[in-house]
């Protein structure tokens, strides 16, 4: 039940689970951070995980699982869906800079238990809360549960990617100093080819971990500042999470300091498999101070990138954003006219992470070579 307000009072006491001192937990985290360091609150509407602390007043969190395989599955499987046109594969670069490490609890930790339908009913919810992939909504409930249940140190629920094993989140503002890293437990996840133990875990769950290194970047994001920024940012986040930062080009993040941006943009287009042209409400009508259409300017980079992609045999796919009509050829410079007849994709106005994830899934289903 995603869009209902939390109840004013619990109908019965919420279910609790005590995590004993000495419990070993496994977590996936960045190699540059200590295993016992909590993740900061989440500040964006998209990305993140199920029960992140939210906003400036949010709390840090740490996700972990008692089962090693569950910790891996919680990180990997939500991003590698089964499709009818392509095998389930581990995207290249997905685990770059990440490690798996064991930590142990040093004290007993009381947790909110949401493992069964009975547990969920006690807080006025059903399995939506622990299954849904739109984390912007589940985070709202997580923040409410954190604030209401002040004696509890986290939440435990049944892992959706690795049923029936449990997984959990700890609240950093209530768990200071309660974890220690298990010596020599750290395992790197970003080897060019998955380690045998990782390959075995994922193969049992239908994921192919063969190395898929490619000389070409996967996606170039073409957009106009002020017309497609948010859509470009959200697509970048989703694509980079699946394939790694090196597989996605977005000018705001992908051009190194001290380089010729013109050459970087041209190389970025030529070196990609697909260019996504993000087309907002004012894409065709945007003008300079003199009232001249920007797309008609031969030096306009939105225009230049699309024309260069066509010249370089890079597939161009329009992404229409919001409630806008399809493009009309007579509203475009003649050089861009065929874009009006090019099949593309659509994002609703003010897209959420679930919309962006669905668009990327649609893109990969229709262009399986991108996987």
Image (cartoon, rainbow, N blue to C red):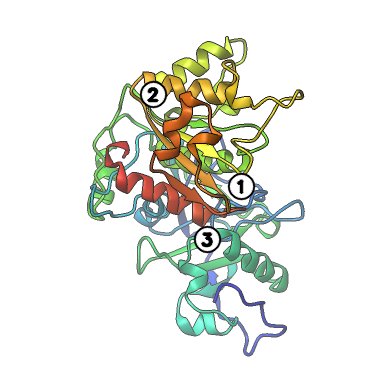
Distance from disc 2 to disc 1, alpha carbons, whole Å, reads 42 Å
Q: Position of residue 324 (x, y in %)?
A: 57, 50
Residue that numbered label 2 is attached to: 310
Question: What secondary structure is found at the residue carrying circle 3?
Answer: loop
Residue 94 is at least partly visible in this image = no
Q: Residues within 10 Å of mark 3 (few under 14, many from 20)?
A: many
Quadrant of the image containing the C terminus:
top left
Looking at this view, is 289 or 156 the one in front?
289
* Picture residue at 64% right of the left edge, 50% below the top: 42
Residue 4 image point, x, y percent? 62, 77
> Mark 2, mark 3: which one is toward the viewer?
2
**Label 2 or label 1, whichever comes before in sequence order:** 1
Task: Report the side of 118 relative to 271 (left or right).
Answer: right
Look at mark 1 in the image and give the residue it sits on. 39
Residue drawn where x is 47% and y is 23% of the image = 335
Count of marks placed on residues: 3
Q: Residue sitting at 57 percent across and 9 percent down?
A: 260
- Find the distance from the CA under tag 2 to the CA under tag 3: 36 Å
Q: Position of residue 175 (x, y in %)?
A: 65, 57
Mark 3, residue position: 134
């Amino acid at each position: 039940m995603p869009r209902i307000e939390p109840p004013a009072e619990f109908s019965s006491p919420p279910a609790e689970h005590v995590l004993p001192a000495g419990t070993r937990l496994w977590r996936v985290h960045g190699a540059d951070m200590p295993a016992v360091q909590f993740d900061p609150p989440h500040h964006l509407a998209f990305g993140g995980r199920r029960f992140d602390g939210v906003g400036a007043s949010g709390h840090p969190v740490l996700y972990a699982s008692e089962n090693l395989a569950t910790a891996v599955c919680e990180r990997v499987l939500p991003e590698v869906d089964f499709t009818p046109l392509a095998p389930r594969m581990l995207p290249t670069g997905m685990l770059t800079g990440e490690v798996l490490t064991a930590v142990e609890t040093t004290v007993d930790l009381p947790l909110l238990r949401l493992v069964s339908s009975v547990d969920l009913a006690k807080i006025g919810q059903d399995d939506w809360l622990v299954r849904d992939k739109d984390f912007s909504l589940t985070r709202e409930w997580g923040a409410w549960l954190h604030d209401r249940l002040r004696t509890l140190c986290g939440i435990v629920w049944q892992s959706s990617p690795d049923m029936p094993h449990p997984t959990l989140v700890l609240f950093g503002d209530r768990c200071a100093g309660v974890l220690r890293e298990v010596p020599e437990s750290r395992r790197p996840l970003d080897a060019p080819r998955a380690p045998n133990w990782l390959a075995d875990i994922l193969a049992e769950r239908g994921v192919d971990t063969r190395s898929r290194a490619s000389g070409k970047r996967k996606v170039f994001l073409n957009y106009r500042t002020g017309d497609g920024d948010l859509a470009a940012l959200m697509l970048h986040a989703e694509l980079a999470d699946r394939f790694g930062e090196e597989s996605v080009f977005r000018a705001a993040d992908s051009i190194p300091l001290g380089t010729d941006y013109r050459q970087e943009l041209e190389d970025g287009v030529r070196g990609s498999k697909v260019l996504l042209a993000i087309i907002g409400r004012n894409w065709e009508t945007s003008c300079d101070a003199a009232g001249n259409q920007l797309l008609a300017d031969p030096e306009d980079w939105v225009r230049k990138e699309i024309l260069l992609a066509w010249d370089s045999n890079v597939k161009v796919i329009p992404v229409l954003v919001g409630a806008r009509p399809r493009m009309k050829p007579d509203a475009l410079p003649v050089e861009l006219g065929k874009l009006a007849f090019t099949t593309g994709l659509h994002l609703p106005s003010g897209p959420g992470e679930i919309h962006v994830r669905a668009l990327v899934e649609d893109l990969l289903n229709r262009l399986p070579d991108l996987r």
